Image: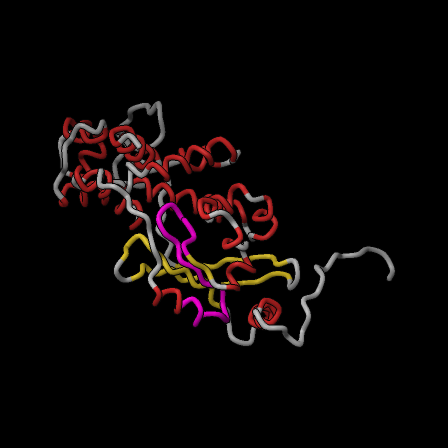
Amino acid sequence: MDRSSEIADFLRSRRAAITPEGAGLPFDGRTRRVPGLRRDEVARLAGVSTEYYTRLEQGRGGSPSPEVVEALARALQLNPSEREHLTNLLVRPADARRAPVSPQRVRPGLHLMLHTLEHVPAFILGRRTDVLASNRLAREVLTDFDALPAPRRNLALYYLLDPQARERVGDWARIAAETVAVLRLEAGRHPHDRQLADLVGELTLKSPEFSTWWNDHRVLRRTHGAKTYHHPLVGDLHFSYESFQTPGDVDQTLCVYNVEPGSATAQALQLLTSWTAPQQQAHPRPEPHTPTTGAP
């Protein structure tokens, strides 16, 4: 990722999203050829000179102080994920940005945690949304990541390129777009990650929607929310997910899909647990249900 281009495109996209009225600026009578704030208006709101802001937007402003970054974040009304991305783009030292990216490993204690959480889907994401580890219910509800070649165990590849995902994931477009925004945030943190660049290239070529979502420069760090999946055996499953950075590795995230005790989803997961257990269970795994029409 070219740092100067990324800074320019991100700042332009954010100031284009804010109206002068939304920023609390009075109407100046000038005709606007493009929507959003002008450079001089952002500079005035941030308390810096127009010349300096222009250099920043062109990637020629050096490394601004944290106070300047915070002022720009306030002026552009950035959310926490966008503030993190702006800091990654403007402040992180060049030597750290070019540090080699080492392979990720999940420590035994986290594998044990996934096993302990066997009553709900849970998995660990690494850089680039790589699925580093998953429990049985995660592989049953989403897809069997363990059955895939290691380079293909990736959540973005699943959501955007696997036809099954469009059938299984409720509100697919929203979830897929959010995953692209997660990759955008990753690109700001690891701009020299060759594998990330290859992933973006593949998604650009193979996903009809990816380029549109990538080019809107939305960024997102997932923390919590709601998801729905449709399982071919037990129907719709509703989850409240929580995401946690794992201690000792800020590039690993534990994702847990929680369910309401006693809910239909909890009961469905109990059935899936019995059908996917390694030992022979009393309840055989049924065939997928095919809806029928007309009289039986």
Q: Quadrant of residue 3?
A: top left
* Residue 128 located left or right of residue 265: left
Give the residue at x 33% y 52%.
104
Residue at 82% over, 55% down: 293
Q: Say whether residue 119 is magenta.
A: yes
Residue 294 placed where, x, y %? 85, 56
Residue 261 inside the magenta-drawn segment: no
Q: Quadrant of the C terminus?
A: bottom right
- The segment highlighted magenta reads 113-132
User: Against 86, is 119 above or below?
Assistant: below
Q: Is residue 33 visible?
A: yes
Residue 202 in percent (x, y) is at 46, 34
In the image: residue 159, left or right of residue 26: right
> Farthest right residue?
295
In this view of the protein, which residue sits in the foreground, 29 or 158?
158
**Residue 243 point in image, percent of width and height:** 38, 60
Q: Which residue is at a point 21% across and 29% down the rendered structure image?
A: 59
